[in-house]
Image (spheres, rainbow, N blue to C red):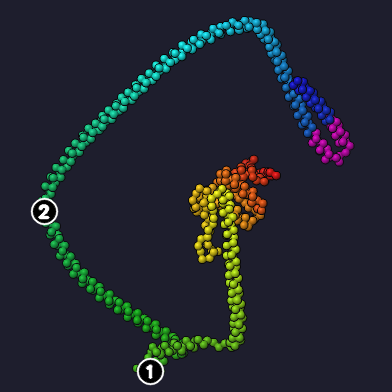
Amino acid sequence: RELLGLGKAVESLAKKVAAGETAVERDRSGLVEQEERTVDLQSLIIKVERGLVGLEIQEKNNLQEIERANRHRNVVAAELEQLAGEADQLQNRLQEAAAGESKAEEFRAAATTGADTIVLELSAARVDADSAAAVLNEKRTLAATSSERQRSVQYALRRLENERSDLQNRLAMQDLEAVEAAEKVRRIKESVSEIAGKIASSDVEIAQEQAELDEAVGILDAARASADASSSELAELNRRAAEAINVRSSVEVQQTEAMTELRNLNEKCVHELNQALAEIVDEHTVSDEFDLAAARSLAEEQRQRLEGFGAINMLAVEELAEAEERLDFLTSQRQDIIDSINSAEEALREIKVRSRERFRNAFAAINENFTQFFMELFGGGRGEMTLLEADDILEAGIEVVAQPPGKRLQNILLLSGGEKAMTAIALVLAIFKYRPSPFCLLDEVDAPLDDANVGRFVAKIEEMSEKTQFIVITHNKRTMEAARALYGVTMQEAGVSKIVSVKFD
C-alpha cells in the first residue's frame, strides 16, 4: 500500500511538473509576444521575470523532488525484492517446521516422562543439599569465630611490637641526651676553672686601677671647684651686661617715640593751625600751673563735637518729612504683620485642635481594625497599637505590640519574619479599611508566609478587593490561583523580555 501511495504521489508530482513546464512555456511565449508588442510595460516585464525566476526555482525544486522520489522508489523496489526473498525463506522454514512438528511431539512426550523423573531426583537432592548447607553454616560460623580470634591476637601482637619499638627509640634518645649532658658538664667545668684563674690574676690589677682612680677623682674635684667659681663670675658679668643692654634699648625706644610724637605734633600744628610748633612755643609761655593732660582731653572733646556736626544739609527738612512718612508706612505695615501673625497663630491653634481630634479618631478606628485583622490573619492572638508618652499627641510615637497564638505579649521587633509580615499586612489592611484607596501595590509580602498563612492572606485580600484593587507581585502559586488576572514576564530569547497575560474570568 505504501508503494502504491508513493507511486501515485510520484505520478501526481510528475503531472504537476509537466503542467508547470507547460505553463512556463506558455508564459515564455506570452512574454516574447509582449516584448515584441510594447516597450512601455517594462515594470510588468520585470515582475513577470521575477515570476519566471520563481517558477524556474520551483521547477528545479520539483525536479529535485522527482529525483528524490525516483531514488526512494528504487530503494523501495530493492527492499521489496529483499522482502520477497525473505518471504520465500520463511515459507521454506514453515514447511520444515510442519515436518518437524510430529518429531517435536514425540520428543515432548519423552521429555515429559524424563522431567517427572528429574523432579523426583531434584527433590531428593534438595533435601540432601539442605542438610549439607546446615553443616556448612556451622563450619562457617566456627571458621569465622576462629578467624576473628586470630585477627585479635595478631592485632595485640602488632600493638606490642609497636610499643617495644617506641620504648627502644626512647631509650636511644635518653642515651643520646645523657652523652650530650656529660659533654655540657665537661665544658662548664673547664669554663669555671678558666674564670677562677682570671679572678685570681685580676685582684692586683684592680688594686692598681683603684689607686689611679682615686688620684684622678681628686684632680677632677679641684677642676670642678675652679670651673664653678669661673662660671659664677661669668654669670654675674653676663647679667650686668644684659641689664645695661636693656636700659640702653628702653632709652632708645623712648627717644624714638618722643621724636615721632614731636614730628606728628608739628605736622598737626601745621595742618590745623597753619603754624609751626616752634612758633607756637615762642608765642605762648607755659606756666607752672598748666595741666597738659586736661588740656589735651578738652581739645580732643571739642574736636569730636566739631566733627560730629558734619557739613550743613540744606535738604534736612524735606528728608525729615520723607522719613516721617516712611515711619508711618512702616508702622502700619508692622501692625498689619502683627495682626496677620495673631490670626495665623489662632488658625494654627484651631488646626492643631482639629488635627488632634481627627488623629485620635483615626488612631482608635485603625487600632480597632488592626486588632480584628490580626486575629483573623493569625487565627487568634491579640495585636494592638499604643501611643508613646509625649507632650503633644501629634508628635508622639506609635508602638505595635503583638501576641500570636500560643506566645506571650511582645514587641513586633521580637517576632519572626513571617509573623512580622503578617502583622504588617494586618496594619496595612486596617489603614485601607479606615480610608480606602483605589489601588494598593503589594510587593512579595507573602514570601515569608507558609501555606496556611497564605490562605488566610488571600482570603482577606479577596474580601478587601470590593473597594480597593490590589496589585500583588508574588512567586507563590496559591496567591496566583486567587488572582483574577495574571501578568507574567518571560524571557524566551536572551535579553528580550515579554509580557504574558491571563484573565481567569
Category of crowding for the residue at label 1, using alpha-carbon neighbours closer than 10 angstroms: few (below 14), some (14–19), many (at least 20): few
Left or right of 166 on screen, residue 353: right
Query: Which quadrant is home to the C terminus?
Result: top right
Residue 48 is covered by the magenta coloring: yes
Residue identified by numbered label 2: 207
Measured as percent of width and height from the top left, residue 245 is found at 29, 76
Q: Residue at 11% across / 56% down in the picture? A: 211
Q: Is 500 rendered above or below residue 30? A: below
> What percent of the width, then of the height, locates residue 60?
76, 29
Q: Amino acid at mark 2?
A: Ala
Residue 444 visible? no
Residue nearest the viewer, comparing 244 with 450: 450
Between 236 and 381, the residue placed more toward the observer is: 381
Magenta part mainly helix, strand or loop? helix
Q: Is residue 15 left or right of residue 258?
A: right
Q: Amino acid at mark 1?
A: Thr
